[in-house]
Every structure is written in structure tokens, then in C-alpha cells.
């Protein structure tokens, strides 16, 4: 298997390539005021169509990794390339455009726009990009997440699970290169959480969607093709086709949970 | 982390600053009005010249209408002279003196009147010196009709010493006197022997007032004895600070002016302050919404929620009170400078207005906060949490209904100028504007949602995302949008209706006066206290004079029934001779001014019907000194706005306007240069005469000055409170903006969106403000100027528009820029 650095070089040479990896991180460092080194030289390649889960104790830098990888935040040093575009080198306007084009998010708090209906929320990224929504695709998505009857409602009128499913549909509507999900089920009860997770995995299978997901639940993480374990801002382990028991063991070894 | 928490608190701070500013300005305005009102009730002139008297006895210089505050009577009503002897015999009395005043002015060597004090009341009898605080005399008392004593300042100004000759104009007649003595006491005036004084003052068996000096230590018992002696006489026994009123009857009347002023300001000030406070508090409660909903979820009762909501706003209010109240006293002093009352009348500075204002504002803030939190506090806890991130889906219909009812009521009120061509009609216009503004603020949310829904439905499918979002936001946050638009619209309505109604009234009044005054010149003698009687024949004898007639003014009360209630207020009335028609054209419709002989009056046609005053009928008036009279209506005139509702004949006024009525002579010439030259020569050769243009074109009247000052002050206050409210409202949108950015909106798109919202806001505010102002202003134009638009500065409208646009854009642009500086990931961390 080629090293991340080599992969990256190859990728940079022929960018943007539709077949290249969805996301590449090279030596990403993020320090916050007060000298906290939240990311300490993380390199990472997420191939298209893959499902990657990220685990680690609280404060290990998972959210920071997601934010930097998604272009929500700029790394202190290092590079982030999404679908062939070096997003870490762009200004905020351009970063937003790239994000809109290539990245979807699902967060623990659903971050739906409260004043808009579910339908308007789902098509909002397309509207902002000035793109005409692909009606058939949006209808498929809405059906798939089971919100067909709820399109006219406002987020406040939906249950937590429904809101998260709407957020999922919104993330997928522009057919992004990658969807980042930071503890997407953290605010949901167990049954609903399983439902949403199942949906996420099915979407990866059915539509070949690339997904990067942070979770504290080893069973959830085990649904992914590959799992990263983080500690103190570094990737300390990479497990292919992980099992829940494996992951739980790793975490216990780190003294996390 | 610290910066983050400050960032999180910032939206709350902005809201609290809004409350602080609203309360600060409100406290200042209410306190200032309170100071004026209190001074109108309790302020006293210093007793001045008569400060040495322990007790002053005078007639009651007030009229007591049934069930209303007393009205000051400016013309002196005399008391019987026999009182002097009666009071002098009471035990403990050192001296009882009957005091009279008459117009007098000393001429200097060049024949120019010396200006010291008030010439209208400068002359007195010698015995009044016994009431002076401390008397030292160079020379001696005047011993005969040809002798005079002067106070030190007058003597110095005229350059005379005891033994010199001096010319004195007494009641308009110039004669030579020998200076017998100089009195070292300020304000003692021009003193002649008592019999001469009585003759010059035209008094027979009466005096202005009686001053009583007590033996040392007996002041209290003497006052009690005088009171007992005069029980049931209707006379007023004044001691201490009250003596100022007895010494100067005009003071009580001037005080009434202060009270009327405070009353007329109170309405608009309370409305504007209430509006600003309600707006600021609503924003502050909105900032707390999430927190309140969570409190509700953990078991706080609705009443506790409302108390919590009120608590934060009240803390900001209480912090604003001390500086605000202090500012109020300074503001009152500034208002005082606008010369609505004579400079001697002091303001009463007690803590009372501050206490009242503090109470009023705290109650207002508490009420507004509880009202704003009412809905959230009553919702089931779960719904409260769900709703706390956004606004409720349906703005209250009851609120909108009340708002629409207010707008309808305002429209009805706006018709006032059609019925009342007076300051009351204008007040109708002004209150109509304010009520309409409040109505709009109440009905706004439903209106905004409805309009935005219609617009959203009509938007082309391919409209730019920021535009689409802006419209969606107006719809989704209709309460916030309408609150902001309503506040700005209120500013527009206030400026337009309040100032244009005022300028329209002024234009109509001065227009009528000008049209009604064919005389080109007015001659009077302010430095002499009274116009010499021989001026009139001298003027009439000049070449090129078409007409000359004396015109005076006094105050009359006209009790009448208004809406079934007894109503009476002090009114300025012209005092006219039968030949006034030559110099004044009141627009006589019926009868003739030539009939103004004996007990007759002329009345304006506006009041003929309402007060039963048709030609030939008899009306009952109360003259300026309190004497009730029955007078026949000799003429009905049309120019009531310019000349007031009633004019009385000189015969009727005679004897009720003091010793020598203060009148000017109006002169109509043939317009030839000879006529003007003749008049100027006449003025040059006689001491103290002044020729001016008859009023109408004369300067800005004090009421207008104070009204314009109020517009400026209130506008500043409104703008400040609107701006802080808008900034607070925009600052609260941080989470909303973060959510949009996480969904893929670029900072540029967010800015485009908020700019479009600002545009919609300014547009809605201008449209609402203009529509609401249009009806009252059209009606005030029709009512006063017979044309469907008001009079006033044309730049007002564009200036208001620019102010609205600038405020709308500046107050969104800056907080949005600040919100955009935070990376979207950081916004994620802050609580919703
Ligand atoms: N805005 C910030 N300013 C300063 N330090 C920060 C900031 N955000 C995160 N940190 C710090 O960076 C480190 C990594 O934080 P991060 O949120 O990435 O952890 P995490 O792995 O997502 O934890 P959790 O599982 O609890 O969500 C922590 O030590 C945190 O305190
Ligand atoms: Mg995290």
C-alpha cells in the first residue's frame, strides 16, 4: 500500500482528478491560543467511496480534525486537499464555495436553519451554490430518509431523529465528494441512533458516498471500512475492517472511555 | 476560551445596552417634564421688593374652575384700602402698608428712558419703603407732588443725585420732578408721595395689596391674626415663599404656562419613551429566550419565568437611572432657557420628579419585560425549548387586531384639524401619528409575514440565493423584522407628523395674521411701561396716514361646555377700539368692529356654534383680573386662528388691565415715503417710542421653539434607542448566521442577504411611516391651509429617508461583519 505522502504527491500532480482520493491531509498541525496542540502532524488519505470512522478519548482532537479536513477551519500548518482542491490555501469565500461543492456535514446539533421548512433546508446548499436541484435525486433522498410527509414542517416541529435525517439529506443533496459526520448520533437515543447509523451505512453502500464519521460508540465505528484511533492530536492506530471488540480494546488501552 | 465567552455574552450585552440607553433617555425626559410640572405647581418668584413684609394680603389671583387645577389671573385685582387701617391695629403689627404700582420710567439727560427693572410697575408710593428689607436713604422722602425718590441703580443710571431735576414718564405722561432722595435698596423703584401714587395708579379707595410688618419675633402670631381677621373675605394671606405670588400676580399665570407646557409635552414624551422601552426590553427578553425556555424545562413556573425575564432588564434599567435622572434636571434647565416664562421664575428642583420618573420607568420596564415573556412563560416547557430557536409560527392575532384598531383610531383622531382649527386640532394630528406608529408596531408581525409570504410566492424560481433568503427571513422572523421596521417607521411618523403639524399651524396662524393686518407699523413704548396717550393723535395728524388705532391684549377666561364638561382655559384676547377695523381685518362675517363699544365682544366664527355666541347674544367671560362680565356679541369674524376666539372692547377692559393699559398703536399708511418719514421723525423726537412691524412675521413663537426643541431631543432619543435595538437584534443572529455558513453560505452571500434585509427593512419602514403620516398630514393641510398637503421644510422627507436608510444599513452591517469574523467552526461550539 502506497504511503500517504506518495499518494498525495501523485494526486497533486494530476489534480483535479475525478478518481483521486476524496480527502487528503498532509502533516496537518492545529494549535489554539494558549499553546494547545489539538492536531499534531496528522496525515491521512480518504479514498472515494470509503467509510472511515474516527475514535479517541475526549479532547484527542477528533472534532478539530473534522473541522480542518472539511475546510471549516484553517490548519496552523500542513495541507488539506478535498477532491483535488487545496482548500487550506484559500480565503473564506472560496473555501465556502469549495465546501458547498464538495463537502457535506452532519453534526451532533443538527444545525438546520430554524426559519426554513425541511424542504428548503435540504435544497439550501444547492440554492446557495446557484445550482438547480436535481429533482429526482432530492426526491430519492427524501424518500430514503423517510421525510416525504414532513417537507413543509419547520425543524422545531420535528423529532431529533427526524432533524438528523433532514440534516443527512441536506448533506447529501449536492452529491458531495465527502460527508463529514461529527458524533451524528450523540444527541439521539439508542434506537434512533442505530436507525440513523444504519441509514448512513446504507447510503455508502447504495450511492458510493464517501463518509468520515466521529463516534464514541465502538459498535458504530465498526460499521466503517476503516477506523482511526486518535490520542493527543495524533493518529495512534489505523484498523481496516475493524470489529467493535477490537476498537473497545484499543480505547480502554488509551485509558479513554 | 475567555474571548469565546465574551463573544457569547456579547449578544446579551448589546441588548442590555439597548435597555440602558432607552431608560437613560427616558429617565431624563420624564424627569425634565416632571421638573417643569412641579415648577408649574410650586415654583415661586422671590418676593423681591416686598421681601421685608412678613405677611402680604392680596386678592385671589387665581380662577378656580370646577374640578380642575386653578388658573392664574395675570391682571391685578385690587383690595380695599380700608384693610390697611384694620390690619395695622392687630396686635404685634409694626406697620401695615397699602402698596400700589404704576408705569414709570426715568429719562436721562439725553431724554432716553433708563432701563432698570420693569417699567410697567416701577412706580410706587413712598410708604412701600417700609416693606423693604433694609432702607437707607440719602436725602429725604418726597414731600410733595413735584418730588420723587429713586432707588440707587435708577439714580445712577440717570446720573442724578438728591436735589437734581429729573424728567419722569409716569403712566405715559412726561413731567419734571425734583429728586428728594436716593434709596439704597434694590428694586425700590420710583417713589412718589402716597397721595400722588394713588392718583397716578388711578386708585380710589383700593390698593394693589397690603403688606404687614410684624414686631420682632411676632411674625407667626401676626400671620395667624391676619388670617383670623380675614377669614371668609376671599382674600389671600401669603407668608414665606408664597409672598412672591402676591407681589407679582403674573407669576401664577406664568406658572400655569409651565404646567400647560409640561402637560402637553407629557403625552408625546410618555408615548415615545414607552415605545422605546418596550422595543429595547423586547430585544433583551428575546436574547434570553433560550435560557428562559431551559429554565422552564427544569421546572420554573410561568410567574418565575416572567420575574426572571424582568430581572435582567430591571438591573440594566436601575443602572441607567442615576445618570438619567441627573440628566433630566439639566435638560429641564435647558428647556427653561427657551423663554416660555419670565427669567425670574425659578425652577423647583426637588427630588420628587426624579422619584416619580424612577418609579414610572421601573414599572414600565417590568411591565414590558413581563409582557414580552408572557407567551414564552405560558407555553408547555417542551414547546418553549423548541420555539426558543426560532419565532412562533403564528404571530398573535389578538396583538394584530389591537394594532389595527389603534391605526383606525389614529385615523379618526387625525380628522381633528377639520373640526378644531387650533393647537388642539394639531395635537390630534400629532397623537394620531404616534398612535398609528404604535399600531403598526403591533400589527407589524402579521403584516410582515403576510406580505413576505405573498412576495415569496411571486419570486422567480431562479432568484439569487441571498434575495430568496432575505425574503424567507422576513417571513420566518416576522416579529423581529416588524419590530425593527416598526421602530424605524415610528421615527419617520414622529418627525413628519410632529414637526409638520407644528409648522402648518404656524404657517396658518401667521398667514391669517398677516392677511388680517393691513397696518404696516406698530408703535409702542416698552421702555416706558405704557404708551403715552398723545401719541395716537400725533400719529393721526401726520401726512399719509390712512388709519391708526390702539390695540392691546389681555387674558380672558371663557367658561363653556365641551363634550358635556365644563371647560375653561386662559386665552389671549385682543382689546380693540371701535375704529380697529382701519388697521386690522379680522375677516368680519357678521356685525361690525365699529360696534365694539360698551360691554361688547367680537368672537371667531369657529366658536359661535359650540359656545352659543351668535351675533347679538350675550356671553359670560371672566376678565384677566377675575371679574366676571356679560358682554354682547357685536361682531363675528373669520380669522379666529390668527387672532384668537374672542376680542373684547376697550370699554369692557377699562379698569381691569391695571393703571395704564399696555397697548400699541397700529398704523396703516398710504405707503408713501413721506408717511414713513413722518412716523420715524415722531419716534425720534419722543422718548421711548419704538416702531416695529406688526407681529405675524415676528420671530418664532416660544411654543413652536419648545416644540421644535422637543422634536430634536426626542428624535435623538428615538434614533439612539432604535439604533441600539437594531444592533442588539442583529447581534442575536449569530447562531442563525453560523448555521447558514455551515450550510454553505459564503460571507459574501451572508452580507448580500443581510444588506437585502436592511433594504427591505428601510423600505418597509419608509413605506409604513409615509402611509401612516400621509393621512394626518393631508388632513392637517386641508384643515388649516385648504390644500391637501402641510406647510414646512421640504428637506424633512428626504432627510428622514436618508436617516432611515443609513440607520438600517449601519446597524446591520457592523454586527454582521463582526459575526462573520468568527470561523464557522467556532460558532458551532457556542450554544444556540
Ligand atoms: N476553540 C478552541 N480554542 C482553544 N482550544 C480548543 C478549541 N477547540 C478545541 N480546543 C482544544 O483542542 C483539543 C481538541 O479538542 P477537540 O474538540 O478536537 O476534541 P474531541 O476529540 O472532539 O473531544 P470530544 O470527544 O470531547 O468531542 C482539546 O484540548 C480542546 O480543549
Ligand atoms: Mg468533539
Image: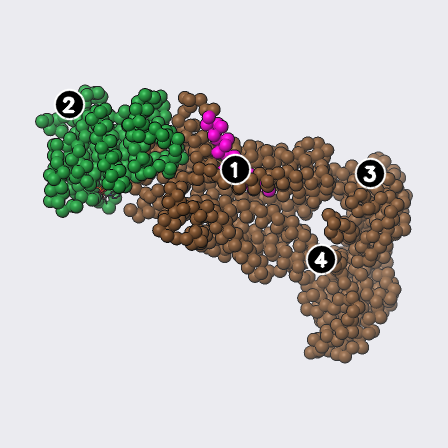
Q: Is residue B190 left or right of residue B34?
A: right
Q: Label 3 belongs to which residue?
A: B587
- Tag 2 and tag 1 share a subunit: no
Q: Which chain is green?
A: A
User: Is residue B714 among what the camera can see?
Assistant: yes
Q: Secondary structure at mark 3?
A: loop
Which secondary structure class fits the magenta region best?
helix
Which of pointers 1 and 3 lies earlier in the amino acid sequence? 1
Q: Nearer the viewer, residue B603 or A161?
A: A161
Q: Are marks 2 and 1 in contact (CB under 8 Å)?
A: no
Badge 2 and badge 3 both on one subunit: no
Using the image, name the chain to which the residue with label 2 belongs.
A
Residue at far left of view? A1
Q: What x and y, as percent, mark residue A222?
A: 16, 35
Residue that numbered label 2 is attached to: A10
Q: Which residue is label 1 attached to?
A: B444
Q: Which residues are magenta?
A: B434-457
* Chain letter belonging to callout 1: B
Amino acid at each position: 500500500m502506497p504511503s500517504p505522502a506518495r499518494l498525495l504527491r501523485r494526486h497533486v500532480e494530476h489534480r483535479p482528478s475525478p478518481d483521486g482520493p476524496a480527502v487528503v491531509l498532509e502533516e496537518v498541525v492545529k494549535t489554539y491560543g494558549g499553546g494547545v496542540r489539538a492536531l499534531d502532524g496528522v496525515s491521512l488519505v480518504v479514498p472515494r467511496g470509503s467509510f472511515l470512522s474516527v475514535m479517541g478519548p475526549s479532547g484527542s482532537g477528533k472534532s478539530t480534525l473534522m473541522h480542518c479536513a472539511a475546510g471549516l477551519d484553517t490548519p496552523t500548518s500542513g495541507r488539506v486537499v478535498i477532491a483535488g482542491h487545496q482548500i487550506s490555501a484559500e480565503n473564506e469565500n472560496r473555501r465556502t464555495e469549495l465546501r458547498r461543492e464538495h463537502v457535506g456535514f452532519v453534526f451532533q446539533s443538527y444545525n438546520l436553519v430554524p426559519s426554513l421548512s425541511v424542504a428548503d433546508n435540504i435544497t439550501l446548499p444547492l440554492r446557495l451554490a446557484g445550482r438547480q436541484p436535481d429533482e429526482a435525486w432530492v426526491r430519492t433522498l427524501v424518500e430514503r430518509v423517510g421525510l416525504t410527509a414532513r417537507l413543509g414542517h419547520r425543524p422545531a416541529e420535528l423529532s431529533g431523529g427526524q432533524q438528523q435525517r433532514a440534516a443527512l439529506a441536506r448533506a447529501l443533496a449536492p452529491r458531495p465528494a465527502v460527508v463529514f459526520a461529527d458524533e451524528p448520533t450523540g444527541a439521539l437515543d439508542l434506537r434512533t441512533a442505530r436507525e440513523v447509523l444504519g441509514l448512513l451505512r446504507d447510503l455508502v453502500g447504495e450511492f458510493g458516498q464517501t463518509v468520515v464519521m466521529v463516534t464514541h460508540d465502538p459498535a458504530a465505528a465498526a460499521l466503517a471500512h476503516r477506523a482511526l484511533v486518535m490520542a493527543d492530536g495524533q493518529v495512534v492506530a489505523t484498523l481496516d475492517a475493524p470489529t467493535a471488540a477490537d476498537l473497545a480494546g484499543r480505547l480502554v488501552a488509551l485509558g479513554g472511555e | 476560551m475567555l474571548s469565546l465567552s465574551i463573544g457569547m455574552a456579547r449578544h446579551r450585552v448589546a441588548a442590555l445596552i439597548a435597555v440602558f440607553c432607552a431608560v437613560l433617555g427616558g429617565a431624563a425626559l420624564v424627569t425634565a417634564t416632571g421638573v417643569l410640572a412641579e415648577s408649574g405647581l410650586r415654583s415661586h418668584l422671590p418676593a423681591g421688593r416686598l421681601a421685608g413684609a412678613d405677611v402680604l394680603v392680596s386678592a385671589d389671583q387665581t380662577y378656580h374652575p370646577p374640578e380642575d387645577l386653578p388658573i392664574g389671573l395675570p391682571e391685578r385685582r385690587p383690595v380695599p384700602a380700608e384693610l390697611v387701617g384694620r390690619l395695622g391695629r392687630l396686635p404685634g403689627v409694626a406697620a401695615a402698608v397699602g402698596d400700589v404700582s404704576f408705569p414709570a420710567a426715568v429719562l436721562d439727560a439725553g431724554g432716553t428712558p433708563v432701563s432698570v427693572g420693569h417699567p410697567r410697575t416701577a412706580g410706587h408710593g413712598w410708604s412701600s419703603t417700609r416693606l423693604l428689607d433694609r432702607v437707607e436713604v440719602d436725602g429725604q422722602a418726597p414731600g410733595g407732588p413735584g418730588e420723587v425718590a429713586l432707588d440707587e441703580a435708577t439714580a445712577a443710571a440717570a446720573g442724578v443725585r438728591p436735589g437734581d431735576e429729573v424728567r419722569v414718564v409716569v403712566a405715559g405722561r412726561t413731567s419734571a420732578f425734583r429728586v428728594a432722595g436716593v434709596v439704597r435698596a434694590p428694586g425700590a423703584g420710583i417713589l412718589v408721595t402716597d397721595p400722588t401714587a394713588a392718583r397716578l395708579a388711578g386708585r380710589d379707595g383700593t390698593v394693589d395689596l397690603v403688606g404687614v410688618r410684624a414686631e420682632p419675633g411676632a411674625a407667626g402670631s401676626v400671620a395667624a391674626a391676619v388670617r383670623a381677621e380675614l377669614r371668609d373675605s376671599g382674600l389671600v394671606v401669603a407668608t414665606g415663599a408664597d409672598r412672591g405670588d402676591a407681589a407679582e400676580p403674573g407669576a401664577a399665570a406664568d406658572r400655569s404656562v409651565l404646567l400647560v407646557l409640561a402637560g402637553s409635552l407629557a403625552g408625546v414624551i410618555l408615548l415615545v419613551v414607552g415605545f422605546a422601552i418596550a422595543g429595547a426590553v423586547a430585544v433583551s427578553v428575546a436574547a434570553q429566550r433560550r435560557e428562559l425556555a431551559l429554565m422552564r424545562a427544569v421546572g420554573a413556573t410561568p410567574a418565575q419565568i416572567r420575574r426572571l425575564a424582568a430581572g435582567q432588564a430591571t438591573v440594566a434599567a436601575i443602572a441607567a437611572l442615576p445618570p438619567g435622572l441627573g440628566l433630566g434636571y439639566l435638560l429641564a434647565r435647558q428647556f427653561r432657557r427657551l423663554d416660555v416664562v419670565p427669567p425670574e421664575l425659578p425652577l423647583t428642583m426637588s427630588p420628587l420628579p426624579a422619584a416619580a420618573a424612577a418609579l414610572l420607568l421601573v414599572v414600565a420596564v417590568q411591565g414590558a419585560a413581563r409582557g414580552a415573556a408572557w407567551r414564552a412563560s405560558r407555553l408547555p416547557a417542551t414547546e418553549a425549548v423548541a420555539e426558543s430557536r426560532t419565532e412562533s409560527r403564528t404571530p398573535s392575532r389578538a396583538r394584530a387586531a389591537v394594532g389595527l384598531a389603534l391605526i383606525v383610531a389614529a385615523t379618526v383622531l387625525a380628522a381633528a384639524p377639520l373640526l378644531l382649527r387650533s393647537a388642539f386640532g394639531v395635537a390630534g394630528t400629532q397623537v394620531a401619528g404616534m398612535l398609528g406608529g404604535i399600531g403598526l408596531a403591533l400589527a407589524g408581525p402579521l403584516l410582515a409575514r403576510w406580505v413576505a409570504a405573498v412576495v415569496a410566492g411571486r419570486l422567480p424560481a431562479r432568484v439569487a440565493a441571498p434575495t430568496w433568503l432575505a425574503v424567507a427571513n422576513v417571513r420566518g422572523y416576522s416579529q423581529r423584522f416588524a419590530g425593527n421596521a416598526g421602530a424605524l417607521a415610528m421615527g419617520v411618523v414622529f418627525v413628519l407628523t410632529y414637526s409638520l403639524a407644528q409648522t402648518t399651524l404656524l404657517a396658518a396662524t401667521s398667514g391669517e395674521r398677516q392677511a388680517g393686518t393691513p397696518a404696516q407699523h406698530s408703535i409702542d413704548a416698552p421702555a416706558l411701561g405704557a404708551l403715552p396717550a398723545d401719541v395716537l393723535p400725533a400719529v393721526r395728524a401726520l401726512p399719509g396716514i390712512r388709519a391708526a388705532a390702539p390695540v392691546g391684549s389681555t387674558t380672558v377666561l371663557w367658561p363653556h361646555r365641551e363634550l358635556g364638561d365644563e371647560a375653561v382655559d386662559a386665552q389671549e384676547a385682543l382689546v380693540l377700539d371701535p375704529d380697529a377695523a382701519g388697521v386690522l381685518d379680522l375677516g368680519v362675517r357678521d356685525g361690525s368692529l365699529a360696534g365694539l363699544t360698551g360691554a361688547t365682544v367680537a368672537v371667531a366664527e369657529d366658536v359661535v356654534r359650540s359656545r352659543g355666541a351668535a351675533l347679538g347674544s350675550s356671553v359670560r367671560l371672566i376678565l384677566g383680573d377675575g371679574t366676571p362680565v356679560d358682554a354682547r356679541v357685536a361682531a363675528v369674524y373669520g380669522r379666529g386662528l390668527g387672532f384668537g376666539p374672542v376680542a373684547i372692547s376697550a370699554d369692557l377692559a377699562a379698569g381691569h388691565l391695571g393703571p395704564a393699559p399696555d397697548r400699541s398703536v397700529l398704523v396703516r399708511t398710504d405707503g408713501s415715503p413721506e408717511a414713513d418719514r413722518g412716523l420715524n421723525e415722531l419716534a425720534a423726537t419722543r422718548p421711548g417710542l419704538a416702531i416695529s412691524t406688526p407681529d405675524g412675521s415676528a420671530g418664532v413663537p416660544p411654543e413652536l421653539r419648545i416644540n421644535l426643541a422637543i422634536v430634536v431631543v426626542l428624535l435623538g432619543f428615538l434614533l439612539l434607542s432604535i439604533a441600539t435595538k437594531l444592533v442588539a437584534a442583529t447581534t442575536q443572529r449569530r447562531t442563525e448566521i453560523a448555521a447558514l455558513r455551515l450550510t454553505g453560505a459564503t460571507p459574501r452571500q451572508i452580507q448580500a442577504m443581510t444588506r437585502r434585509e436592511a433594504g427591505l427593512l428601510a423600505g418597509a419602514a419608509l413605506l409604513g411611516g409615509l402611509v401612516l403620516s400621509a393621512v394626518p398630514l393631508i388632513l392637517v393641510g386641508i384643515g388649516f391651509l385648504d390644500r391637501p398637503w402641510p406647510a414646512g421644510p421640504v428637506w424633512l422627507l428626504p432627510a428622514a429617508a436618508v436617516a432611515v436608510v443609513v440607520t438600517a444599513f449601519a446597524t446591520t452591517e457592523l454586527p454582521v461583519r463582526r459575526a462573520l469574523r468568527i470561523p464557522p467552526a467556532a460558532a458551532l461550539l457556542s450554544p444556540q
